[in-house]
Every structure is written in structure tokens, then in C-alpha cells.
Image (cartoon, rainbow, N blue to C red):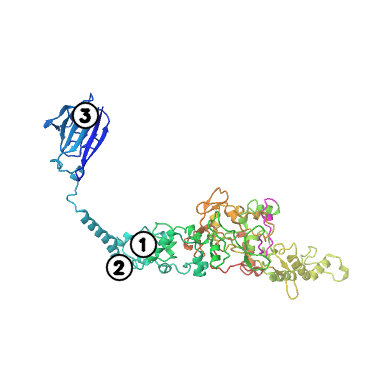
Amino acid sequence: MSFILRRISTTKTGKQIIRDTALPGDAITLGREGSNTIHVADLAVNPHHATISSADGRTVRVAASEGLGFDLNGRSETIADIDSGAGGELRFGGHRLTIAREGENIILLVERIDELSQSSKDVDEAKAFSLQGVMLGKRMGAWLFGLLMLLAFLIGPIWAWYSYKNVNERPDGYHADSAWLSGPLSSAHASLKNDCQSCHVEPFVAVTDKACVGCHTGEHKAMSMAHAGAPAAMLLAARHPPGIGEKVLAGFAKTFNKPQGRCVECHTEHEGAGPMPATPQKFCADCHDGMSARLKIAGHPTTLADAADFGTSHPEFRPLVRAAPGAKLVRTTLSKGTVDYNGLKFPHDMHLQATGGVARMAASFRGRYDFGKKLECANCHRVEADGVRVKPVEMERDCAMCHSLAFETVGGVTRTLRHGEPDQVVADLTAYYRSTPPGRPLQLGGMQRRRPGAYAEGQVYNIYFNEVATRPSRAQDAVRAVFSKGGACYDCHTIFAPQTGNSWRVAAVSQTPRYLQKGWFDHDAHKETECADCHTAAPGSKTSTDLLVPGLRQCRDCHVGEGGARVVKVETATESPCAMCHEYHSDGGKPWLPPRRAKKNTAAIANKPLAATYSVSMITGTGGRGLYDVTWRTPPLHGARRGG
């Protein structure tokens, strides 16, 4: 035996739809609450009105459970036993429950008999207890809400902008056009929070480049020198073919007067307090990935190599080098065996050995200089005050503590040869041998008689006077010794012997301050790394012509692409987008950080010359007097004094 719930619905055309549902169990509940087995949505029915059960599968007992009864065949009852074979009709509010039997099943037929119940007036509880009756209609409410939005987010902001368009700075308080803000300004523009019109010059017109360069003048250009100097057709041909989505977006931008290539396409604002985010790699890769082929097809061949991701697709570095003595600087692909002639003789391997004469000398100086048990790279190569690049090596500051040019001590003051001035060296040595006698023997006291003639040959005073007579000619021997093999100058410099009308000459020294013109490298950011970890060829270099600039392989030991892509195993991966090393604006500063915000290395600023070298520099003067006709390789590009 089981209960079958049967519901009859009548359509607008009068057609009846009958639905039967089997009810589990021998007892079911009926009421207004939705948890009942038979749910009757009528306010005249209690939440839990009655329980319907059958013990023998034929007789049905109906018992009211909350005080209100029910009508059974016209009589009011609270409990009743009904023979399902004979049937019966019960009324609960405006609903009728008919009990019947079909085979082994008891049929419970529920149907509405009153079009409007006297208690509920044919409304459900949600409507009966809502405020809908006292509220405005949907149409009127929609019109009022639309007018309110128009006033708050269009008319109000326009009025606020118009009221303060000629004011340099607005007063504190709420301004209606702040409703249009998509987020707070970055820290660089935080001072402009009350000066919206400095950027948003015209209403309903996107921010133009003119508004940006009105403040960012001088160093910041609309484009870098390399891009600004290229023909517009070449720049357009370099870009990758746009997809369907990009074409749609470009169409919308054109429609709303947002031309491509504006400053704000990269330097987005109103994205939260803090520094502006770095330019994403996609901004560069959109052109430089496969660019050489596209430019060749368009008739604009280029020598630039394609680049898409530093971890997987980046060309080898191309530093500026001097391929032969006296040759011009050329850009060449870095490879094993690349040479750079700087005019010096310097074996790095000898100076970096853990044992040997150089290491023993460094150990003996530990109390006077910042030396360890052996020489380190930083003992001679010192970082600039801003921590970015390495200073050119200077004799007085970096070499004189070991390679002394002293030749005489007068009254406790040491005289040294003039470094970088060969003619002055010759003059000083000549004057020294002409103006000073040889050391006086003790046998020749001030009161001893001097005997002339051949009688005194071979005696002490005769030997002394012969030395005095020949001493001026010894100057040439001393000069020759200084500039010859084993001399103070020869071991480090290329020497040219005197020719007709010329004196001794020294090959010019050219120390390159920046090998990689197109990339940025910050030594301060790598101060926790040992120099030899990147300059791997330095410990084994026997000649100064070896180019010790690290290659792409050394950088990829730590740096991977923007998304972590790599071609070699990296233990500590640093995600490196294009903007980490390459600048777009020609301001010479760190690619995505304005120079005024660059962190200063205070330790490097306090890096003064060693105290023990003061006596040398006071005699020889500073190193900026054209040492050996020295010419520093200063490239013509703007901002060459900055960068890696």
C-alpha cells in the first residue's frame, strides 16, 4: 500500500492536467509550511495542519494537529477515520482533499475549489506581508532610479569639473567627479589627487601625450631615440599582425578618440597606491618577436636580432670592443676568444692567485688596506657612488699601494715619478741626477784634507770625485731602465722607444666605461654575488686583451623569462621581463624607475681613497690630467654615464 498524491490543474482553455506523485511512508503531513508532504499555499491553513495515516492499508485516519479542524462531508471535525473504498471529501481552507482507492493504492486528490479564499484573498505569504502595495510601481521606480544615476554620475561630475577647471588645486572635501575614479593614483602622482584637470584637460577626451610631456619634459621623450628616429612605416611594419580581438579594440579606440601609441598605454594610472607597475614583456615582444623577417619583407632590413623572452629567446650580447690597438670601437657578438685592446698589460690570473708573491704581498698589507689573504676583484675595481657601474681603474688609487713609483725620500716626504706624464718622468730623473751628488763616504769628513793629482788615484776621495763627475750621465741609464723591460712602466704599458725628434712614449690607455650600450646592469643589485660567479673567465685570464664581460649563459644561471620560461636548470630563478634591463625612454636611468627615485648606495658614496695613498696623490696630483694621453671611451649615446 502507498499513498498517491494527485493534483489537477486547469488551463485557460479549460483543459485539465492530472499529475500523480507517489508519497513514501504510512503517514504524511499537510500544511502551509513548505516542509509538509502536501503543501497547501493558503493562509486559512495552519503551517502544520493535519496528519494523514493508514494502519491497515484501507482505513485512513486524518487528525488535526494545531487546533483548527477540517470539514468532512460538510461537518467540522478534528479527527476522522475514513474508509478509502467508500471515499470521502475533506476541506482545508479553499482546498478540497478527496480520498479514494484504486487497486492497492490510496488516492489523495488535492484541488482548489474557491477562486478566492476568504482568508488569503488568493495571495501568497510573500505578497501578503510585503510593502509592495505602498511602494512605487516598477516603471516609476525605474525612471526615478535612472534620473538619480544621471544626476549623480553625469550631471554632478560635469558640474564639479566645470566649477574647478580654472583652479590649480581643489579644496578638500567631496567632489562629484570623484565618482569617475577607477582607483587611487600611484605614489608618483599622489600630489595630483586634488588637481584632476592637470591631466584630464578636456571633458570626455582621453588623456593626451601633451598633458604628460607638460610635466615630464627634458629627459622623458615620447619615444626613445632609436624608435623616434625610425620611419613611421618601419615602426608599423615591425608590429605583429593584429588578431580579430585587437582589430575590434582598435576600432573602438578610434571611435572614442583614443589614438594608438599614447603614453598611458604603458604607464597606466588609477590602479592603486604605490609605484607604477613595470612595462609587461608583451609590449616589447609584440614587435621584436620575429621582427627581422617582417621588416625584411616590408623593405626595411635591420641588423637587430629577434627577441621574445629572456629565458628562451634572446640574442647573445654585443659589447663595444676595440679589436686591434688603435682601432675604432665596433660592436661584436660576444663569444669565446673575443678580445679588447685597452693599452694595458695585466694578468688577472697572477693577481687572483691564492698563493704566490702577489697573495703574500696582499696578506702583508691586511693591516693597512682592506685586503684579505689574497687579492679580490673589489680591491682594485670599485663601484660608482650610485652602485650601478664600476669606476675606471686609477693608478694612484688602485695600484700604487703595491706598484710604487717612489724614487727618493727628502725630509720624510717621498718623491714619486709622475704617472701618466712620460716627459715629466724624464725631466724629474734628469734633474735628480744633476742636482744631487752621490752618497758621501764616511772617510771624507768635513775637516779632512783633499789631495789633488795622480797621487790619490784609487783612494776613497778619488773614487768619490770620479762618481761626482760622471753622475749626470747616469740619468739616461735611469730613464732607459724605467721604460725598458723590468722597469716601472714597461710591465704594465706598451712603450715606444725615442725616435728622431721624439722622447719616450706610452701607448694610450682606453678603459671602456660601458660595454653593453643597449642594456642596463646594476652592480649594487648583485652585491651579494661573488664577482667571479659572473666574470667566470677572470681567474684564468693571462692578458688584459681578454674580454671578461659575462655572456648570456652566465646571466641565465639566475635570470629566467617573465613567465619563468628557461632553457637551463636554474636553482634561484629571477623572473626578468624586458624592462628589467632595457629602457624605452632615453633618460639614461633605470628602465622602469625614474632617476630621482633610484636608491642610492650610501656605502659606495663614502668610499673615499685609502689614507695611505694621500702622500702619493699630493705629489703626483689627481688622476684627471690626461694620463698617458688617456682617452676614456665615452660613447656618443645620451646617458652613457649610466647603465651597466
Q: What residue does disc 3 label? A: 101
Where residue 476 sits in the image (x, y, percent)?
Answer: 76, 69
Where residue 368 sits in the image (x, y, percent)?
Answer: 63, 55
Q: What residue does disc 2 label? A: 162
Vertical order, 601 against 222 (above or below): above
Q: What segment is highlighted magenta in the picture?
A: 338-355
Kindly indicate the quadrant of the structure image that contains residue 489.
Answer: bottom right
Q: What residue does disc 1 label? A: 193
Numbered disc 2: secondary structure: helix
Report whether residue 348 is seen: yes
Quarter occupied by the N terminus: top left
**Amino acid type at image mark 3:** Arg
Which secondary structure is most common in the magenta stretch?
loop
Numbered disc 3: secondary structure: strand
- Circle 2 crowding by C-alpha within 10 Å: few under 14, some 14–19, many from 20: few
Disc 2 vs disc 1: Cβ atoms closer than 8 Å?
Answer: no
Label 1 or label 3, whichever lies nearer to me, is 3
